[in-house]
Amino acid sequence: MDAFIPVNEPDLSGNEKKYLIECVETGWISSEGPYVTKFEEQFAARVGRKYGIAMCNGTAALVAAVRALKLSPGGEVITPAFTIISCITAILESGLTPVLVDSEPRTWNMDVNQIEAKITPKTRAIMVVHTYGLPVEMNRVLEIARRHNLRVIEDAAEMHGQTYYGKTCGSFGELSAFSFYANKHITTGEGGMVVTDDPGLAERCRLLRNLCFQPARRFVHEEMGWNFRLTNIQAALGVAQLERLDQFVARKRRMGTLYTELLSGVKGLELPVPETPAAKNIYWIYGIVLSEEIPFGAAEMMERLKKLGIGTRPFFWGMHEQPMFQKKGRFNGEHYPVTERISRRGFYLPSGLALTEEQQRRAAEAVVKALVA
Ligand SMILES: *Cc1c(COP(=O)(O)O)cnc(C)c1O
């Protein structure tokens, strides 16, 4: 049998090795070192922001971003039900309450038309999450935020190189967060970054990242922080990866287009939306939702694909359906039908940057086989 196709494999064939060797040879391996600053400056510039604050991962970037805003505890933050736990972690970590909205059935992004109904006198912020490759309807979000005087935090962890009506994703939040996990468009293995235009917020993120050590009296603390620092080694990878971001985005788009070509004739599959008026999909992952005519869900499909040598991952599981929250009565009685449907019927195919066309063809053939098996 052909070799198993993993769900993700990064492409590290540029200057990664060269820069990493340089870190070892110069001894700059901790979070001190020239690549950290270089990566922060180059990445912020790429997104069109004034400041970049590198973090040890995307979750940490979100945690620091929320904390930096100093929102009063007990306040509410509106965010999608269909997202990664990191968003809720960040909201809860600052003593705030997450309030959920459902997704659009086809783009899988948060349905911005549901935001206003969730606004209360306690609402302080909206945390938008661009999901899987297409941007959230930012014009509507920004207009609602302005009208209700709400802060906007942007989770752009899946959006390196994406734009919304020509403006870069990651440029919309007062603070915007990125991840550089191994399956993102550019990776540092583990890593993240907050970007912002506000010098005060940038400074706060730097403090929070570095245990709130104070410049004048290092071990005297006014506030609690974390060690969220990114290492020079990771940043070196980031600089090398960033050199190829345009190439990576173009490749992901070609991969998405090929999968769609191979699968568009197959009955029972809801494939990613190739484009909206605001953006062409960058296919962070190539997601598929099984329509109701398929008599089984994503779990069964993924099991079948595994037997055929194809690695997959499930879609996010709704935040309101997380056992740890249900046990505590959080989101009690709340239902988000789109989230519930796509979390049960959605999964994604191998989508990493090292994927070959031949592997894609095998994956697509396996999908067809698995449906009738
Ligand atoms: C990957 C991801 C994160 C978390 O990033 P980590 O680096 O894995 O902590 C946060 N939000 C979204 C939308 C993501 O896809």
Image (cartoon, rainbow, N blue to C red):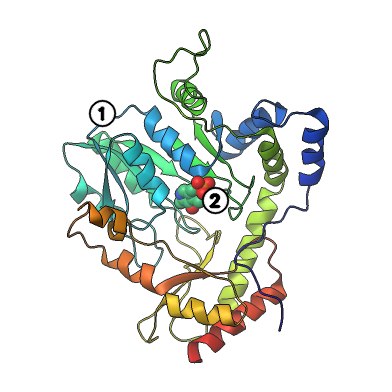
At which x and y percent is residue 34?
A: 71, 27
At which x and y percent is residue 68?
A: 40, 28
Counting every numbered tag in the picture gives 2
The outermost residue toward the bottom is 372
Looking at marks 2 and 1 on the same chain, the residue that comes earlier in the sequence is marked by 1
At which x and y percent is residue 255?
A: 63, 67
**With respect to residue 34, does 169 lie above or below?**
below
| Front label number (2 vs 1) | 1
Q: Which structural element holds mark 1? A: loop
Disc 1: residue Cβ within 8 A of ligand 1's nearest atom: no
**With respect to residue 249, does 240 lie above or below?**
above
Q: Which residue is mark 2?
A: 162
As shown in the figure, which amino acid type bears the numbered disc 2? Answer: Gln
- The numbered dot on residue 122 is none
**With respect to residue 150, does 202 lie above or below?**
above
At which x and y percent is residue 329?
A: 20, 53
Residue 45 shows up from this direction: yes
As shown in the figure, which amino acid type bears the numbered disc 1? Answer: Ser
Q: Position of 261 compared to 71: left or right?
A: right
Q: Position of 240 compared to 204: left or right?
A: right
Instruction: Kindly identify the residue that appears in the image at 37 percent across and 62 percent down.
Output: 317
Q: Which residue is mark 1?
A: 72
Instruction: Calculate the distance from the C-alpha at mark 2 to the C-alpha at mark 1.
Output: 32 Å
**With respect to residue 5, does 28 lie above or below?**
above
Instruction: Kindly identify the residue that appears in the image at 57 percent across and 48 percent down.
Output: 160
